Image (spheres, rainbow, N blue to C red):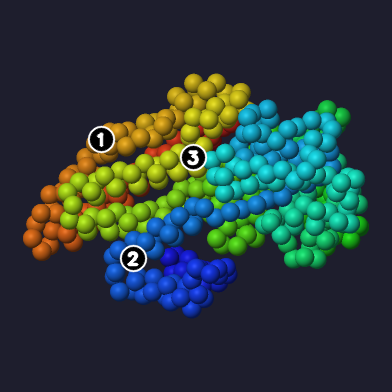
Amino acid sequence: MIQEYLDRKKNIPLNIGSTGESGSAKSTFVNAKTKTLESNNQVLAEEVIQEYLDKENDISLNIAVTGESGSGKSTFINAFRGINNGDEGAAPTGPVETTSEVTPYPHPNYPNVTLWDLPAIGTPNFPADNYLKLVGFERFDFFIIISATRFRENDVKFAQEIQRMGRKFYFVRSRIDTDIHDEERCQRSKFNAERCLEQIKENCTQGLQRQGVESPQVFPVSSFHLHLYDFTLLGDTFEGELPAHKKHALLLAMPNISLEVIDKKKKAFHAQIKYYAMLSAGVAAAPVPGLSAAVDVGVLVSVVTQYVNGFGLDVLSLQRLADSTHVPHDELIATIVSPLAAVKITPGLVLKVLSQCAGTAALMAAEEGSRFTPILGIPAAMSLSFISTYRALNYFLDTLAEDAQRVFIKALGLDTSV
């Protein structure tokens, strides 16, 4: 993974000023970093690993959302970001057009992921023929076109222009829960939810095909019940069609709409643990008493905070979940086992939890003791530091992922006995 990152860096354009690096100098620098990993140059290896992790956790993802007034695009944006309509920072909603300009809405826990609320296509200030240029087409990774009924001519023109420019777009049929509920009231005993959903989806697909859209992808969703209908499929489609380096950003920002999403997040977090452990081992090479332990605790605080935010176990996310599902906040908290969830992560808290993990605490103590052994002391300290950090992060990740699953099950009232 580190080599993959270095390979990507070679393709990043360099803007050269009067005091900037030359192209050849930058290439030499990157090549030196690659050789560093091969030659075990510890200091520079740590720099490469840290830079890789920083880049992985700060990759930008820009998602454009458009549709006619009243289509539910603002509610969709809020739901995707895990916040409720009316919350601070929420996209404004209403029966009339509330978006008069291109407006960014960063994810509250992952500000590198931004959903952009675009004005409706064909309004006086954003005519269809010049729409892409006016909204700044180039900045977006993909487009979501939302409609609460059928997709109209301007939606089709927009999609065809995006297609012509080689970008991805997806049609989202919103408020599907309302339509299905209305059909159930009309058909009563003859009602079949799956058949109704497929009919709505097929009707939208055929309508788009008749208007000239090739192979349209239509996803019926409810922004108030993301775990139902096609939102999971929509997320899987995003993930399958995004470049590899963007998938991580998308996954962490996705709301917990299924146990499978929680498990995917766990696997993504787990894949990075070895790099944090390598950083810990590198710091352990410094013959300074107490330095390694202090740095390790700082790393653990940072990474555990990522886990808590990614699983939606921070204070604000849990409160929003309680508000949106109408499950009392206290009942959600009661399902949580880890002392690291729903609290501020501090060095003192991390050390307290570590002290309860006898094996890991013993390894950290042994690391400090081994540092003073001649010749073999530093290599031993590095090895013990790697193992203790690796074990600690695995333990924290496992317990927080289990808490996320319990909270999800409680919030949706799922029956796990079946």
301 displayed left or right of 180: left
Kind of residue at disc 1 = Gln
Check if mark 1's residue and mark 3's residue have beta carbons within 8 Å: no
Kindly identify the residue that appears in the image at 43 percent across and 59 percent down: 51
Kind of residue at disc 2 = Leu
Residue that mark 3 sits on: 309
Kindly identify the residue that appears in the image at 37 percent across and 57 percent down: 275
- Extreme-left residue of the structure: 374
Residue 106 in view of the camera: yes
Q: Earlier in the sequence, mark 2 or mark 1?
A: 2
- Residue 160 location, x and y as percent? 84, 60
Q: Which mark is residue 44?
A: 2
- Residue 407 location, x and y as percent? 50, 32
127 displayed left or right of 7: right
- Give the Cα separation between the discs numbered 2 and 1: 35 Å
Residue that mark 1 sits on: 356
320 displayed left or right of 118: left
Secondary structure, mark 1, is loop
Secondary structure, mark 2, is helix
- Residue 28 location, x and y as percent? 43, 76
- Extreme-bottom residue of the structure: 24
- Residue 246, above or below 32: above
157 displayed left or right of 375: right
Kindly identify the residue that appears in the image at 85 percent across and 49 percent down: 126
Which quadrant does the N terminus fall into? bottom left
Mark 3 packing: few (<14 Cα in 10 Å), some, or many (20+)?
many
Q: Which mark is residue 24?
A: none
Mark 2 packing: few (<14 Cα in 10 Å), some, or many (20+)?
some
User: Which numbered disc, 3 or 2, marks the residue closer to the eye?
Assistant: 2
- Residue 94, above or below 376: above
